[in-house]
Amino acid sequence: MTKFKLSMLTLALAAAGSGTMAYAQTAPQADEQAKADEQIEVISVTGYRGSLQRAQAIKMSENSIVEVLSAEDIGKLPDTSVAESLARLPGLAGERRNGRTSGLSVRGFNENYVGTSLNGRELLGMGDNRGVEYDLYPSEIVSTALIYKTPDASLMAQGIGGTVDLQTVKPLSAERTIAFNGSYEKNDQDSGNPDFDNKGHRLSFNYVDKFLDDKLGVALVVATMETPRQEQQFRGWGYAGANAARAADGVTVPEGTVILGGHDSFTRSAMLERDSIALVLEYAVNDQLKATFDALYIDFNEQDARRGLEEGGAEWGTGAYTITGVENGLVTSGFYDGFYSVVRNDVREQDAELKTFGLNLEYQISDNWLGQLDISSGKVTKSITDIESYSGVGRANTPNRPITARSWVMTPNGAFYSDHPTIAPVDLTDPSLIRLAGPQAWGGSLAPIQNFQGVPGFGPDTAQDGFVNNPDFEETLDSVRLQANGYVEWGIFNELELGVVYKERSKTKINNGAFLTANDWPDASPIPNVLGVADLSFIGINGVLAYDSLGLYRSGFYTETNAALLENGRFGDTYKIDEKLTTLYGMLDISTEIGDIAVTGNVGVQIVRADQSGDGFSTTTNAQGFTEPTPVSAGTDYTDVLPSLNLSFEVADRQYVRTSLSKVMSRPRMDDMRPNSQVTFAFNDNNILDDDPLNSAWGGNGGNTELKPLEADQFDLSYENYYHDNGFFAASFFFKDLKNWHRNVTLINDFTANYIPGFHQSSDGTGNQPPATFLGRLDVRQDGLQGFVRGYEFQASVPFDIFHEALDGFGIVASATFMDGKLDDGGRVPGLSEEIFTLTAYYEYKGFEFRISGTKRDEFQTEERGLSLSLVPVNRQGSELWDAQIGYDFSESGIEALKGLRVTLQAQNLTDEKDVSYNGDDTRQVVTYQSFGRNYMLGLNYKF
């Protein structure tokens, strides 16, 4: 068999038309390459095995430690989304959000600490921060993805976790292709909401061709999709201390026993719609000049309905309850005598639009030197409209309303409810009973609003019938890169790369929100245009009335009270962050021998000059209870130096030992960089009259525009054995010494300037005294936290034909990652799972293809949306997900009329894996339970 060499990379990429070859070769390199290519066989295997072989060739040829994902064909990744495919690579782990694999961790760091680029240029995300939600980018545009676990000096989109570079097809090096892809999608859970479907579809068109005597290459992708998601969620409020006096006869309640305090559970239906267009134009003007233009447009919309109940239970909802079962400190069954159930019809709509383009000019200055100019610009806008709409058996304080009483029993999935033993049930699906008004007096924040004063029996606290969060985001990124690559003969160095990169980035968030009150307050009207019933049978409740709350809001049904008048956090989370980065870099490629061992690699350095600034607001509350915002600005500048060294030793035929030393960094989170601050005052006599600053009534919190990047010193060591054209195994060790991480610190601050005499004082019962001190706690983000992450990665790709020719077509790809790490304050690194496993078993033979894939990760820290849609840290239990695919490529059938046709059937989440979180270490104390169902896709691909 012909021996693999480094130039296999060129042929692998030629077969795929990948964008990996970012730069043209200098003349001496091209001559050397041409000679080597004569000895190397072309990769011609198609399908999944072909994608593995191309990925292996690229991985083998890199000096850095990388993982590679290669498309099976034009417009066809091995999975249905970029996120799912990336999550199967060693050291990477996907995070399921609302039923979709969206987030991604690389070596224990989530996407906020991972650099992401498209064709080598930093890519904007559509999230709240820097992190990219990978499932929102169409898989049809991706030809190859490289995950750099070790950086080199030419890599601009760096992250502490690593860098994900998504690459589109290069049309001048690809074959002419016209391909149509279509799929029908269905979730096996029926829609729990009457106005949503559990069916969807995907369509795409890929076109690649060359013109003008192969001097002009064109690649076009047009894709559209509608993908459904269904969810059943139980969410417990928490677990309160149980009152032993509430035990039924014969039931003993030991001290320390806890009881479920309430729940807000719902059935969720969502439909994600995405339209995208990608274009690549490649033009070889002459032998010296080549121009490449690429553009990407994505229009994203997601409609999401969450309908269910919010009900207080024992202790936190009512003291009238009876305990009927206790096991090992947990009340396992009981019944409570009444709570005015809040029927929730919450709808969220997200609209986002991304536009990005780039122009690259390559100019062959001489036989040995190549110059490049790269210009790019990108913009993302996103708007979220999240409606909370409350209804029930009548407005709070309305007399003679029926009250909901329930029995419950604890199960592994949370609480399961049934009728009370003596009190008649309330039918929350009865349109003649349910009124469009808040049944609980939860509108205390509306107390200063004059419109809700002076109505006997109905104070401002009865005027909250819903809420709308409506944050708007806008982010731009412009960059210019100028570089030169030259062939040199400087001892062990054979190539020099020098460059300068300038980037400007800006992100704006306007945190809009409003309290909603029905126009007929204090009356309560029936629900207009009832859609049907939202099914809650998974928790033992027949359901609640479903209606279009977003439509009601947009029709003007509600009176809006601007939340920015009353909630300091609205202006406190409204900001604009600007960054200007200038990077000078240089890198020398290494090519030498030590005895019989070939040594390649690179050594380089980046010098990064940062100028960052922020605009926002400082907020406090005045004597009338309204927010007073004051504009504030802050900024800083500094310089970072990032050295890197990568070495690859070919210790034996196709066996490599790679090592790397580098300093890596991630830019600070955008929300942490806001200059905003918020002042709070606790109207509690114990705090007001305490002269201890740590327990005083004064407090505050804020961001920090002067934050420096998160930094780590990194060491990597890897052994890779490419024992077969389509098989290898590797073992890696890495250690990241975190030199700067951001932490929450408490400072003592003087709040004298915020003091309002006659307002900031104790109660009448203590003589209306002023605060004992004007000092208090100020919680801010600061630099200086340290820690570490280390890990071991093991991976193998094994084609079974190495054991016997009868097993040709069978194979497995597997990996195991073991990590540990911590921050010096005891905190957790976001995204770190201590164990990650992946396995794909496949069979391909004469057009028939089958594979089953599984991923497993243990618990990790992530974020979810809390109050006002802000991101709050949470700990998630691990998950184990299994997917399968079966298909047939008719090109192997011998039927000429069907040549080019490929049919596939995919199943996702085969085992219907649930997401469950618990209170502490007691797995019986379920806090959240989520079930998403299985997803099926029938796909057709036709390639001309």
Image (spheres, helix red, strand yellow):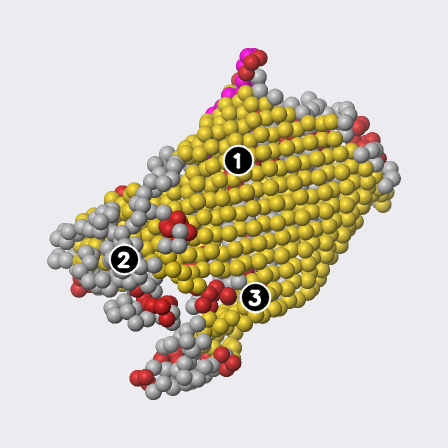
**As rendered, which of 799 and 626 lies closer to the eye?**
626
Residue 474 against residue 614 in the figure, above or below: above
Q: CA distance from mark 1 to mark 3?
A: 38 Å
Q: What amino acid is at disc 1? A: Thr
Q: Is residue 67 visible?
A: yes
Mark seen at residue 616: 3
Q: CA distance from mark 3 to mark 2?
A: 40 Å
Magenta residues? 883-895
* Residue at (45% x, 76% y) in the render: 622
Q: What amino acid is at disc 2? A: Ala
Residue 208 against residue 352 in the figure, above or below: above
Indicate which disc, 1 or 3, sits on the residue closer to the N terminus: 1
Q: Circle 1 is placed at which residue position? A: 224
* Residue at (51% x, 25% y) in the render: 940
Indicate which disc, 3 or 2, sits on the residue closer to the N terminus: 2
**As rendered, which of 29 and 704 lies closer to the eye?**
704
* Residue at (74% x, 49% y) in the render: 481
